[in-house]
Image: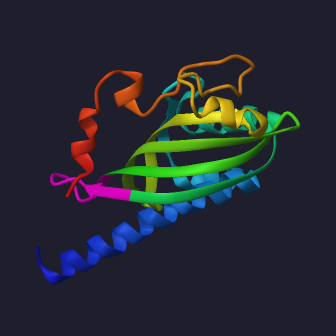
Amino acid sequence: MSIEQRLRRLEDREDIKTLAIMYGVIMDERDFEGIRRIFTTDGILRSADGVFNAEGLNSICHTYQERFNVLGATNHVLHSHVIKFSEDDKDSAQGFVTSHAEVSRQGDASVVALRYQDKYRRTERGWQISFREMSYMYYVGVDDYRDAIVSDDRIRIYGDKRPADWPEKLTKGQSPAWITDYLP
């Protein structure tokens, strides 16, 4: 790789990191222009538990509007972000994001540990999310946290108790093969 290509790669990495950070701010501020900026027009938004399943920008915005209707204040915090660029396409990358959020949902304080598996694409608007799947280690009311964290059923925000999406070694009996996709 030439110096110019390496510099471009570093700039691209910073742009994608900024995209991931701004996602949280955009969610917290309920900024639909921001949603339209960070997702591609043909973007896909999913969750491992099946609650989110939107294809296309209008569907993604509708999904978030439905979510915002039951939420009060939120605080999304990004912890770490691994980015892997496609060897075949300089305008494609994938990412793995770890984060958490503090959430007011239907008048109750909740906490959630989140992971995002992303695909990014460079468009005429810059880097955007073309695919995002979120998963949860826990999503519970703060009063339920102590009991939930030691249980397999750590998703409790929907009024029932559901199995957590991860760690997969505990939930599915084996470590996920996709981990190697993000290792250097």
Query: In the current view of this chain or complex, which residue is farthest to the bottom?
Result: 3
* Foreground pick, 23 / 54: 23
Q: Position of residue 105 (x, y in %)?
A: 80, 37
Q: Magenta part of the protein: which range?
A: 82-93
Q: Position of residue 40 (x, y in %)?
A: 48, 47
Residue 31 visible in the displayed image: no
Residue 178 visible in the displayed image: yes
**Is residue 4 depicted above or below 157 in this figure?**
below
Q: Position of residue 9 (x, y in %)?
A: 27, 71
Query: In the current view of this chain or complex, which residue is farthest to the right?
Result: 107
Quarter of the picture holding the C terminus: bottom left
Q: Position of residue 91 (x, y in %)?
A: 29, 57
**Magenta stretch contains residue 91:** yes
> In the image, what residue occupies the spot 66% across and 59% down?
25
> In the image, what residue occupies the spot 48% across and 61% down?
125
74 relative to 86 in the view: left or right: right
* Foreground pick, 119 / 70: 70
> In the image, what residue occupies the spot 52% across and 27% down?
164
Give the quarter of the image for residue 141: top right
**Magenta stretch contains residue 157:** no
> In the image, what residue occupies the spot 32% across and 22% down?
173
**Is residue 6 depicted above or below 156 in this figure?**
below
Give the quarter of the image for residue 53: top right
* Foreground pick, 99 / 35: 99
